[in-house]
Amino acid sequence: MLRAFRSELWTRFHALPESKRYAETQAEGQTILDRANAIAGFLFEPGQEVWLADCDIHYVDELRRASKALPGVSSPLRFEFSSDESEYFEEQTRVEVFAAKTVWGPGRFDELLSEIAEDRERAVWFDPVSGRVFAPYDGGFDIVLEDSRMVPEVETEFRQWMSASDSKL
């Protein structure tokens, strides 16, 4: 969805060589973490305050959670919204978001990043001041920058982790 709304500020990087989606070895798992921390390190300084938003998508009749543990966060805020059928959801769904301010640090969120890489969690980190977004997923990392002139810079920095396709997918 990020690329649909902010395409001029968006780019994508793959988590593993040759667009491989999931790690099969401990070394591949470490590659994913190394890449995640390098890309997030381009976006955020160590010790920088950012927001972490953990998102869960459910069908409307599934059980709601009162809270969720997030790394480095004591009491996340809980938001919920529903969506009828749309281009993103095939049927009515409920999206739960648990969000809180936290501090970015390399390696600090490795456990959560590993869960995301295995498609067991969904989360994004963002800086509300600059508008920068780090959105890892199972297979890679979407980012949004505050200025379209910065996109070529980050793409040059991490060129070897990009798709060969012009679509960047």
Image: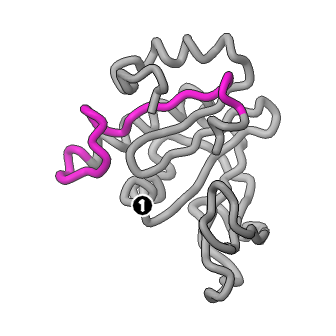
The kind of secondary structure element at disc 1 is loop
State the image quarter where residue 134 is shown: top right
Reply above or below: 72 against 133: below
Reply above or below: 84 against 12: below
Percent x, y of residue 38: 45, 31
Residue drawn at 35 percent across, 21 percent down: 164
- 25 displayed left or right of 128: left
State the image quarter where residue 49 is shown: top right
Residue type at mark 1 is Asp
For the residue pair 2 and 156, the one nearer the viewer reads as 2
Residue drawn at 46 percent across, 12 percent down: 156
Quarter of the image where the N terminus is located: top right
Residue drawn at 66 percent across, 88 percent down: 61
Per the image, the residue denoted by label 1 is 119
Figure disc tally: 1
For the residue pair 126 and 20, the one nearer the viewer reads as 20
- 21 displayed left or right of 133: left
Percent x, y of residue 73: 66, 63
State the image quarter where residue 31 is shown: top left
Q: Is residue 25 magenta?
A: yes
Percent x, y of residue 44: 62, 32
Crowd around label 1: few <14 · some 14–19 · many ≥20 (10 Å): few
Residue drawn at 42 percent across, 41 percent down: 140
Reply above or below: 8 against 124: above
Q: Is residue 27 magenta?
A: yes
- Stretch of the chain drawn in magenta: 6-28
Quarter of the image where the C terminus is located: top left
